Image (cartoon, rainbow, N blue to C red):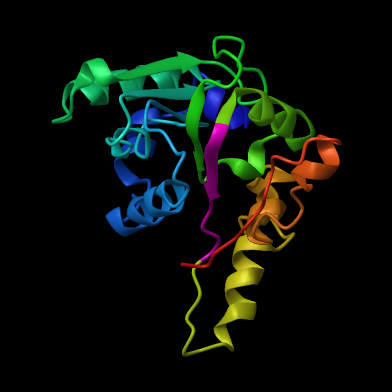
Amino acid sequence: MATFGKSSFDTAIYATFRPTYPRSLFDFVFRYHERNKGARWDRAVDLGCGTGQATVELTPFKRVTGVDPSPKMIEVAQDTLKKTPVSTGQYEYIQASAESLPFLEDSSVDLVIGAQAGHWFDWNKMWPELARVLRKNGSAAFWIYSEFRFTGYPSLTKRINAYSQGLDPLHSVGPYWQQPGRSILENHLVAVPDGNEVVPGRSVISRESSSQ
């Protein structure tokens, strides 16, 4: 994810044109979390938060922390928060990597999310950290969106793939994507290792997926 951290990267344009997420997505995550009777709503953490688009949607939680390795992203997130009609004292942003969260105590987080960011994480380090910081009955939700598709015109898929994932730098943006992150995203995170294999002996991680 080095491109986002470069001094030349325009975070203002990024924040303006990056797609947002529908409220129904967050409602789905919250319903998943609350189905466990022991679920709590004290603290949520957004990993790879960028400019905070998803962070500010975690309103049911008393305390919300956005985490991103890019200082420019954090700066924009903090500035944007001041213009957002939410309780600003409820939110904080911290510059850090998703794989190392020393500022979070053991079993202190109720919900962890990653919005269009999970393909950048080192999951061999992420799973142990998630197992450490998540409270009993806590939840984690990671979602991504890949290239658009015209479902009514499947023949166009090859053309879209050729442009977005091709190897010719003159006719495709493929060579300009950072790898392996982009490939992991386009394959819908199937390359993410099973948490129970990364954290052996911990039967606390259950993994579910949804296309909703």
Instruction: Using residue 176 as the reference point, say whether residue 88 is left or right of it.
Output: left
Q: Nearer the viewer, residue 166 or 188?
A: 188
- Considering every residue shown, the one lying at the far left of the view is 85
**Quarter of image, res 209:** bottom right
Answer above or below: position of 26 versus 135.
Answer: below
**Quarter of image, res 77:** top left
Can the viewer see residue 19?
no
Residue 40 location (% of width, % of height): 41, 33
x 74%, y 48%: residue: 192
Q: Is residue 151 magenta?
A: no
x 55%, y 23%: residue: 5
Instruction: Using residue 146 as the reference point, say whether residue 204 is left or right of it.
Output: right
Residue 134 location (% of width, % of height): 58, 29
Residue 45 location (% of width, % of height): 46, 28
x 31%, y 59%: residue: 24
Can the viewer see residue 137?
yes
Q: How many marks?
A: 0
Quadrant of the drawing holding the N terminus: top right
Residue 20 location (% of width, % of height): 33, 49
x 62%, y 58%: residue: 208
Answer above or below: position of 34 versus 9.
Answer: below
Q: Nearer the viewer, residue 180 or 194?
A: 194
Magenta stretch in the rendered image: 136-147
Main SS, magenta region, reads: strand
